[in-house]
Image (spheres, rainbow, N blue to C red):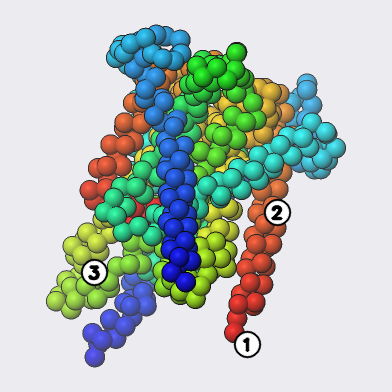
């Protein structure tokens, strides 16, 4: 009996280690591309080959000197910031309406607002492309390759995330605190401003972060909406990568990795990221 | 008394004055989605019924010929078949590899847990283009894999890994794994440890516990994760373009080509709807098959 028990225990232990080994490999696997991009951006030689002949930071300088990356970075920051601002404001208001009020068409509204998650980015992008051309002819106003055209498209990326994250934070909110405030004489506006809004803050911060990142790294929806001289960073990177991979593009990618990593760390100070994804 | 009534009304969200204002808060967001997603999709669908003419570009019509052309053209059937095959393989492989990590993340008491979860989310956030660039450096002829193979003397000249279906599979699996891990982890966390302990106290070995207890109970997560990942694979663009090269065609790049290279809008529009509908049909079939199995298991397990 005892030896059999020991054997079973040993087997279970071995099983655990196999499980851990697979998990570690999977972890490594999803990190491989990130690790290599950062590493290559520091290589001395221009043509990527292993092992590196030495290390340098000059590719960062080189990347910054290329207008397509510098302008792309600037444009992506602008688009992401504006799309986040408009998307989070309108999305949070909509989430508030959906969670706090009962009205006909509430379910349909929720489905509509989460719609951009369901439609493939490339389909949303091509449909916006033909739509913009149609609208341009009617209104005699440019939409393709303009800042407002890109922002209006990118708002689509931010609304569903905002509705999801803000709804979740509103559902978890204790209404008794609001009622207490009102009982103590606070009007609806004061209650909202002093109680509800601060309690919504984690959801709003998370929504802003995700919205910004979704817009900043978007490729598919943007692909057809850019034009010469007005290209976002991911599209500029794709165009470059279709010809070659070198330390310059790796440096650009590393800048994006660092930016997104920093945003995630900052947000984690406000809300536990592991709780909301 | 009045205050109690007001409170009750507030609770149900029907306070006087707020009644009309509340739902109105959703108007800006709803208008934005309607104007920049629903309306463009409607226009695109209308165009898919038009006729293409190389000289006049697009002729107003109501015809199904673009859809018929797709299903009678061996090339495009092949593109769809490749897309479905890649999506199915990548979904299955990511499910297989995500499970152990998701399980350990769900069951760990380590104080590093939240850091580990963030580490899973992080690659997902850096963007597909960046990750494709990383794989290009790993899989290229001068990449680290070939360097290692040559160094070990396993091959005498570089093995072609880039611009192959293999590279596309690897790239897509790496893209979708975090989604699968996070979905499975949240479902496994909801399964009590006591269920597993009870099974193993009753003499079930780890494999039996997994097969008879853990897997059936985590099936909702398996279904949710597989559906999400399958959809993402079907719509993949950056990874097949950068790692598969021009020869390897999946639906999303083929769709893009119709608008940019061939400028055949009606056919491109039809491709968009064929992509969406086939994805929908396949996920519905997959979900039904899997949940029917789950239902079956439940009946089997139910006490009589």
Q: Mark 1 points at which residue?
A: B304
**Residue that sits furthest to the left in the current view:** A184
User: Upstream in the sequence, badge 2 or badge 1?
Assistant: 2
Q: Mark 3 lies on which chain?
A: A
Q: Residue B235 carries which label?
A: none
- Left or right of B231, for residue A192: left
Mark 3 packing: few (<14 Cα in 10 Å), some, or many (20+)? some
Residue B107 spot, x, y in % from top left: 38, 60
Residue at left offset 60%, top offset 13% = B156
Mark 1 packing: few (<14 Cα in 10 Å), some, or many (20+)? few
Instruction: Pick the residue in front: A142 or B77.
Output: B77
Up/down of A126 relative to A73, above or below: below
Q: Name the residue under label 3.
A: A188
- What SS does tag 3 mark? helix
Contact (CB < 8 A) between labels 3 and 1? no
What whole-number distance in Å separates the C-alpha atoms at marks 3 and 1? 55 Å
- What SS does tag 1 mark? loop
């Amino acid at each position: 009996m005892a030896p059999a028990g020991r054997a079973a225990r040993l087997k279970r232990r071995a099983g655990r280690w196999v499980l851990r080994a697979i998990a570690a490999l999977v972890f490594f696997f999803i990190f491989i591309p990130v690790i290599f991009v950062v590493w290559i951006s520091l290589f001395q030689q221009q043509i990527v080959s292993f092992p590196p002949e030495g290390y340098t930071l000059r590719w960062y300088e080189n990347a910054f000197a290329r207008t397509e990356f510098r302008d792309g970075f600037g444009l992506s920051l602008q688009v992401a910031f504006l799309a986040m601002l408009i998307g989070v404001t309108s999305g949070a208001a909509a989430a508030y309406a959906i969670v706090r009020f009962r009205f006909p068409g509430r379910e349909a509204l929720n489905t509509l607002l989460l719609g951009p998650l369901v439609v493939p980015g490339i389909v949303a992008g091509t449909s916006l492309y033909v739509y913009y051309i149609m609208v341009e002819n009617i209104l005699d106003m440019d939409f393709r390759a303009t800042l407002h055209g890109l922002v209006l498209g990118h708002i689509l990326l931010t609304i569903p995330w905002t509705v999801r994250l803000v709804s979740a934070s509103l559902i978890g909110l204790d209404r008794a605190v609001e009622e207490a405030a009102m009982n103590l004489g606070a009007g609806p506006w004061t209650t909202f401003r002093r109680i509800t809004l601060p309690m919504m803050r984690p959801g709003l911060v998370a929504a802003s972060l995700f919205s910004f990142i979704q817009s900043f790294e978007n490729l598919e929806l943007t692909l057809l909406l850019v034009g010469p001289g007005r290209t976002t960073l991911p599209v500029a990177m794709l165009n470059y990568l279709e010809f070659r991979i070198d330390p310059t593009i790796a440096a650009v990618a590393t800048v994006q990795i660092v930016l997104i990593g920093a945003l995630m760390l900052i947000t984690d100070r406000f809300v536990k990221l592991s709780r909301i994804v | 008394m009045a205050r109690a009534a007001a409170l009750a009304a507030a609770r149900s969200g029907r306070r006087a004055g707020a009644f009309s204002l509340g739902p109105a808060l959703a108007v800006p967001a709803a208008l934005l989605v309607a104007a920049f997603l629903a309306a463009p999709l409607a226009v695109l669908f209308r165009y898919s019924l038009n006729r293409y003419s190389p000289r006049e570009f697009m002729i107003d019509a109501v015809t199904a010929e673009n859809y018929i052309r797709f299903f009678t053209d061996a090339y495009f059937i092949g593109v769809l078949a490749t897309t479905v095959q890649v999506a199915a393989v990548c979904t299955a492989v990511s499910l297989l590899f995500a499970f152990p990590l998701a399980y350990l993340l769900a069951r760990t008491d380590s104080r590093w847990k939240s850091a580990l979860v963030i580490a899973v989310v992080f690659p997902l956030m850096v963007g597909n283009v960046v990750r494709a660039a990383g794989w290009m450096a790993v899989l290229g002829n001068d990449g680290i894999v070939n360097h290692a193979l040559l160094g070990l003397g396993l091959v005498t000249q570089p093995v072609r890994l880039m611009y192959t279906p293999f590279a596309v599979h690897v790239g897509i699996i790496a893209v979708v794994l975090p989604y699968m891990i996070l979905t499975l982890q949240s479902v496994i966390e909801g399964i009590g440890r006591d269920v597993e302990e009870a099974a193993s106290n009753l003499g079930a070995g780890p494999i039996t516990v997994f097969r008879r207890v853990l897997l059936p109970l985590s099936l909702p997560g398996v279904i949710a994760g597989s559906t999400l990942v399958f959809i993402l694979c079907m719509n993949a663009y950056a990874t097949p373009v950068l790692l598969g090269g021009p020869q390897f065609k999946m639906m999303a790049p083929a769709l893009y080509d119709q608008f940019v290279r061939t400028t055949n809008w009606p056919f491109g529009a039809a491709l968009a709807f064929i992509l969406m509908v086939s994805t929908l049909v396949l996920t519905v079939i997959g979900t039904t098959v899997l949940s029917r199995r789950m239902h079956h298991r439940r009946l089997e397990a139910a006490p009589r």
